[in-house]
Amino acid sequence: MSLTPLLKPRSIAIIGASDNKARIGGVPVDLLKRAGFARIYPVNPKNETVQGLTAYKDIESVPEVVDLVIVAVSAEATLPMLERCHALGIPAAMAYASGYAETNEEVGVQRQETLVTFAKASGMKIAGPNCMGNANFTDSVFTTFGQSFQPGEPAGNTALLTQSGNMCATVFRMARRAGVTFSHVINTGNEAAVEFSDYLDFLAGDDATHAAVCYIEELRDGPKFLTAAARFRAAGKLLAVYKVGASEKGAEATRSHTAALAGDSAAYDAAFSRAGVARAGSLAELADLAYLHALGAGKIRGNNCGVLSISGAAGAILADALALAGGDTPTFPQSVQDGLTAQIPGHSMVSNPVDLTGNIVNSNDFLLECIKLALQPDDVDVLLLYLPGAFLTGALPQVEKAAAGTDKTLIVIDTFAMADRSHLTAHGIGYFDDFDRAARAVSAYGAWAKGGKPTPVAAAPVTSWPEIEAGRAALSETESKDALARFGVPVVHDALVQTAEEAREAAQTVGFPLVAKLVSPDVAHKTEHGLIRLSIKDADAAVEAFEAMMAKARSMNVHIEGVTFEPMLSGGVEILAGVTRDAVFGWMLTVGLGGVWTELMKDACHNLLPVDAAGAEAMLRSLKGFKLLDGYRGAPKADITGAAKAIAALGEAVLAGGDRLREVEINPLLVMPEGKGAVAVDALVLLNEADAAQGEQAA
């Protein structure tokens, strides 16, 4: 069923309607009346009229089957009332009441579960519970008890969608101060029956909405969110999100290094990047992104900025702020620099940023030509002008003329906060009164504008996993490597031995130096228990290592499959590649450099599966320590292409393994010198219980 009855209703009944315009049941009646909404039906058994309107003793007495019913009664009374509304054929409802799952108490959780069951069985679109309602400025429909959203506000093309009523009002006010106007303001409440992404999907198809700014605490359906976000991107609509909880508190490693690196925030970052979502770093930035989209949708194509400033210091501050926020100030071509030098009186820095110098006080005739020159380079997407106070007042005619003659966006920064924003907006000129805020907004919006690479489609698996018996929690290293090799992951082949005699014979076959490892599905991190020996140089040392490991393993009371001998490789760069299952978005790939980079620096990149070889290479190149792969300090360049193919094969293996897999990690993946490929030295496969995996699949 469509959300149209909920968000664009033509008739509304308010159960619990009040004559008092300040009460929860009275506010929506007052707002709807003042908005000129015609078909309002207050329901109140004690009053003949409510705020001058005919009141009805019960919902059954209302003379038509309304599109939407607002239920402004207690939590205990809400569900019985919804059942009566459903019996009448009412398609949508809004539940204001609190006292549900948000309490974290058993009675509230159970009450919400019952409401969810009813919604699924009835098909009613029920907003909330525990929500403050919505405002549709396009159609002048106010179903909220919040006082921040008033009739008479101009309608715009930005939607505001939040999981907090207070933050809904806060962001709305911030954005309105910047001149942003709204099509819809939606507070989702507990999302018992209508989930965040359901609203997002509606807005993606809403002709009146060109952008959506969102406050998110936790998504409930990651795949649905990604689908709705893809619709936004395909339509050229901005989707900007502020996700609270970016810091990781108490994230700890369980069975793998990958799990330690792949936290909740990393999954959201990966998902937003995949979906082409602009991620805001603050509520203010969320409002600023809406402002920039309304100002210059289609004109701001990236985050490379030209900077013209009346102060050399201010230019440097802006360049630093842009760099920290992910933007850039590309050096102007020599022809542009020569032109600027000819225009600006006296000696000045003209490479970008450009110091206009204080001479602009005496004469600013040269400013128009300087702006034109700075806009010439193809790699300049936006021009920032630092012209505070009187400097802007005197230069405004030239700035306006320059803005009218370009298809790029000009943004003025006035730290004196004296500029007339509405006047500048009327001429298509942006305005900020803070360096950092301007830099963050332009950098984030520009990154969104130049993004939007299509998501690779996962091909149907052509290879399958080996049979895995029920009850297994993990595969041994040997089993793990053999399984991954089926999908094209290059692995170090080893010899499994179970006696000292086999150890001596296998060691001589493998050759020296070699590595010895205990094979047990019960021991994930063998180094910590002394169950790996490196640089074994002869058969006697191999036998001694075998016997010591077996004795240690017996003392640990773990399942023992034996000890493997494998050649000790050298000359490569160690990286980690692992896949974990995020509870919201599904399989997430983590790639990082090995050794101290993984353990200490946590230098890692994350992406949702599927990831092809090109995507894997892009992940490697994004690492802070990528130089180690790229021939740092004269070292041979590593085979980045080979590593990317191996990582893509790992992703394919995980997708083929499905719900039986819990986590898969290659650590290390040894990247050999260019042209010699990469090889999985160690691998870890953790499993879900077979019955649990089947339950997940059924769900």
Image: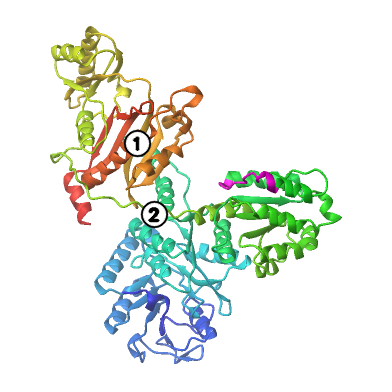
Residue in the image at 71% along x and 56% along y = 371
Quarter occupied by residue 7 = bottom left
Q: Which mark is residue 577?
A: 1
Residue in the image at 36% along x and 64% along y = 195
- Of all residues, the one furthest to the right in this rendering is 362
Residue in the image at 59% along x and 44% along y = 324
The three-letter amino acid code for the residue at tag 1 is Ala
Write the start and end of the magenta stretch as one range: 325-336
Label located before the other in sequence (1 or 2): 2
- Determine which residue is flagged by label 2: 454
User: Vertically, is 456 above or below 545?
Assistant: below
Element class at badge 2:
loop
The three-letter amino acid code for the residue at tag 2 is Pro
Q: Is residue 328 magenta?
A: yes
Asked whether, in this view, residue 311 is left or right of residue 137, the answer is right
Residue in the image at 28% along x and 50% along y = 458
> x%, y% of residue 311?
76, 48
Number of on-image labels:
2
